[in-house]
Image: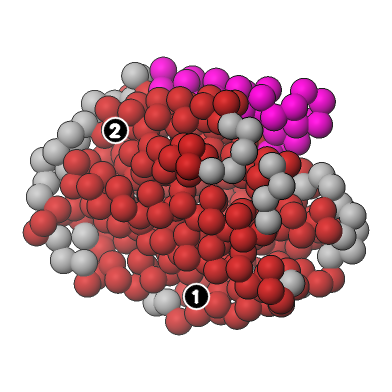
């Protein structure tokens, strides 16, 4: 038991620093605006990251069944770190920026595409869903720290310091990856039937769509209404996610999983529908906490359900789940950028909320 918890702690630690690298890059739209980019440029450059993830994740899923997952994680963390450092050399939007985003996307798929499956490799008992939730919350926590640190560095030291700090976090994650357990099951993903996980892949696509468009475009939207620092959104979002597994986890059993899912789905789409009501700090914090509670329950619940549906190929199931999530992000972020340029942010967020309502039809969560 001690060794098991030690392995989980090592996984959480390594993922935490990897996501510090990733979460700081949430503010990349500000860099794009700094380089005179448009909302459409934001959607394209941010979306190409997810496109790279989409292309590479199936290969990562296959590799995760044959190669020790810790090595895939280390490669991903190093790739993210190097690509982030190279952004310090960018002074205009162009081919190099697109190439670096592609490298970041491929690297992300290597690291994040295996982390959920590693939880199931380490823990085979009833605690694995809870550990997966804790891992998700730890990753989300960086969305409060990374953007907040990024906002400070951009304002006081410039974009070079901003990219350097994210690069260092990625390098620490790669070093921490050396201490991950050497575990990889020799399963054949080609024998896995994708049909059992189809509902959860659909759910992952929708969650990725709503989450991706919100975290990418809410900061620029807030700038337009006079809230120049997006840190309160990220901090409140993380607080909501923490509340799920720190306070509400036991209560979920009392109301039933189906009821919990419906409540979480409703809370997840609350922010896109109420975007027009955000007029100050208090309304932003309230909407963000509700959004965080919904996401904090929805993502790990769907992820666990996907891996439980195909126990013979959990590595592939996790990779496909992350693939669907990033497909949703890529498609929606790109479309959101174009749509909001033509019709405005308010209408685009309303449409995003309507898309999120499809989460109510998912069963067996």
Above or below for 216 versus 64:
below
Q: Position of residue 118 (x, y in %)?
A: 31, 39
Q: Residues within 10 Å of mark 1 (few under 14, many from 20)?
A: many
Query: 190 left or right of 321?
Result: left
Q: Dividing the picture into quarters, in which one does residue 201 lie?
A: bottom left
Instruction: Check the picture and name the quadrant holding the N terminus.
Output: top left
Above or below for 41 versus 80:
below
Above or below for 266 versus 15:
below
Q: Position of residue 288 (x, y in %)?
A: 73, 57
- Magenta stretch: residue 170 in it? yes
Q: Dividing the picture into quarters, in which one does residue 150 lie?
A: top right
Looking at the rendered structure, the secondary structure element under dot 1 is helix
Q: Which residue is mark 1?
A: 359
Residue occupying image coordinates x 73% and y 52%: 219
Q: Which residue is mark 2?
A: 72
- Magenta stretch, residue numbers: 147-176
Query: 243 left or right of 22?
Result: right
Prevailing SS of the magenta stretch = helix
Q: In terms of depth relative to the viewer, which is nearer, 315 or 181? A: 315
């Amino acid at each position: 038991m001690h060794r098991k918890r030690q392995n989980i702690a090592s996984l959480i630690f390594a993922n935490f620093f990897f996501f510090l690298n990733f979460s700081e890059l949430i503010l990349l739209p500000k860099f794009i605006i700094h380089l005179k980019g448009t909302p459409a440029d934001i959607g394209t450059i941010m979306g190409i990251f997810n496109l790279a993830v989409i292309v590479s994740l199936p290969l990562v899923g296959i590799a995760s069944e044959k190669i020790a997952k810790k090595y895939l994680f280390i490669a991903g963390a190093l790739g993210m770190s190097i690509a982030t450092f190279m952004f310090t050399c960018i002074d205009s939007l162009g081919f190099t920026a697109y190439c670096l985003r592609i490298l970041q996307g491929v690297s992300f798929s290597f690291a994040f595409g295996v982390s959920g499956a590693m939880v199931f490799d380490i823990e085979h008992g009833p605690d694995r869903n809870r550990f997966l939730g804790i891992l998700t919350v730890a990753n989300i926590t960086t969305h409060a720290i990374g953007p907040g640190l990024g906002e400070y560095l951009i304002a006081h030291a410039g974009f070079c310091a901003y990219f350097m700090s994210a690069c260092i976090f990625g390098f620490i994650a790669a070093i921490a990856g050396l201490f991950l357990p050497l575990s990889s099951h020799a399963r054949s993903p080609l024998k896995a039937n994708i049909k059992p996980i189809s509902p959860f892949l659909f759910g992952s696509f929708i969650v990725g769509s709503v989450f991706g468009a919100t975290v990418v475009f809410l900061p620029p939207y807030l700038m337009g209404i006079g809230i120049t620092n997006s840190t309160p959104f990220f901090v409140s979002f993380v607080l909501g996610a923490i509340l799920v597994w720190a306070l509400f986890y036991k209560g979920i059993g009392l109301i039933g999983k189906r009821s919990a899912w419906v409540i979480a789905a409703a809370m997840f789409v609350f922010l896109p529908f109420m975007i027009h009501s955000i007029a100050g700090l208090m309304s932003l914090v309230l909407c963000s906490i509700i959004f965080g509670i919904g996401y904090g329950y929805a993502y790990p619940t769907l992820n666990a359900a996907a891996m439980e549906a195909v126990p013979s190929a959990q590595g592939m199931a996790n990779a496909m789940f992350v693939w669907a999530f990033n497909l949703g992000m890529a498609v929606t972020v790109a479309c959101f950028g174009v749509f909001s340029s033509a019709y405005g942010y308010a209408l685009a967020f309303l449409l995003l909320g309507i898309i999120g309502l499809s989460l109510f039809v998912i069963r067996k969560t």
